[in-house]
Image: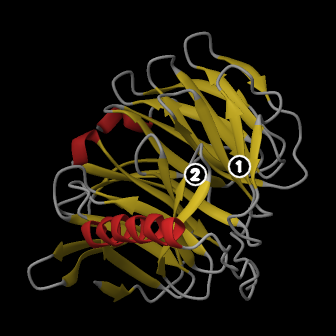
Amino acid sequence: MEVNLGEIPFGVDFHPSNPLAAVALINGDLHIYGYNSNDSSLQRLLNVNAHSESCRSVRFINGGQAVATGSKDCSILATNVETGATIARLENAHENAIYKLINLTESTIASGDDEGCIKVWDTRQRSCCNSFNAHEDYVSDMTFVSESMKLLGTSGDGTLSVCNLRSNKIQTRSEFSEEELTSVVVMKNDHKVICGSQSGTLLLYSWGFFKDCSDRFVDLSPNSVEVLLKLDEDRIITGSENGLISLVGILPSRIIQPIAEHSEYPIEGLAFSHDRKFLGSISHDQMLKLWDLDDILQCSSNNQNSQVAMADNDSDEMDVDNNPPQSKRGTKPKNASSSNNFFADL
């Protein structure tokens, strides 16, 4: 399934229980689509002029009753999913353009901006409850480990940060890498942190030892790894600058197989549908595409079985093209005092 969005998308998210997908667009609009697997259709249900500048990130919140968007105009907006009406808007959520939003719990979200500031918003207390000057450049991605109450962030400054939400302190920050860090996931039952980078290398950190990576996987791609999406404790789905989506195993680190080619342009976002039947992808080709995840995993299983059989019958190594054509990386434009009553009307 696919649909032309009409503008370059920067963020995608799926409703937690219904067949709905939300997309954030470069012109400041928010689109919500309904999808039907029976007739392979995508239908636009809402088009909201959410922000005056580019809409950078989108997340369903409050159990799917609302959708939150963050923008280059420094604002965060909460929109009613059914009607498209504005629930609440915080005009100056950050002093700088917002780059990323993620969900933490049912009632909290985190936002990161272009100058490295991370904030946590509590919908119950209706306030900004944590703020961290974690980085020196844009916050490219974040992930949350609920058991330890740690919020991890990656940045264009080449560092990984660990923020402790209990003590409201930056617990640690890694040494500077030679390239921008673009994405982060936690795997192996919270024992390993995986970071994507602009060079295409995956950096592996051991939990509790964040100063320097413990391992590197350099065989994935010569292109920037734009997005990481955790499939399970041993596998991730990667989206690269050249438009390729791949299934990758971690420890042992290997490319299980390329699973889709969205386009020749950078992958801007990946997300699972609520039932994990579909994998959604967005790119600079202005398309939202939904891939059947069951088919992908079945093909992956068949491919692995075939590789095992080949290995048993042939000891010769197979040559692999590690230098696919490169494309220019799409950049999100950069762009001012925070308020504590964003969720007052939620």
Q: Mark 1 = which residue?
A: 336
The x and y percentages for residue 209 are 74, 22
For the point 89% across and 40% down, the residue is: 176
For the point 71% across and 85% down, the residue is: 324
Marks 1 and 2, how far apart at CA: 16 Å
Position of residue 180 relative to residue 329, above or below, is above
The x and y percentages for residue 55 are 53, 66
Q: In this view, does 115 lie to the left or right of 243?
A: right
- Residue 136, quarter of the rendered image: top right
Position of residue 260 relative to residue 252, above or below, is below
Q: Mark 2 = which residue?
A: 100
Asked if residue 296 can be seen in this view, the reply is yes
- Residue 95, quarter of the rendered image: top right
Residue type (three-letter) at the residue carrying disc 1: Ala
Q: In this view, does 112 lie to the left or right of 176?
A: left
Q: In this view, does 165 lie to the left or right of 234?
A: right
* Quadrant where the N terminus is found in the figure: bottom left
SS at circle 2:
strand
Q: Neighbour class for label 1 at 10 Å: few (<14), some, many (≥20)?
A: some
The x and y percentages for residue 243 are 58, 80
Q: Residue 296 carries which label?
A: none
The x and y percentages for residue 312 are 50, 65
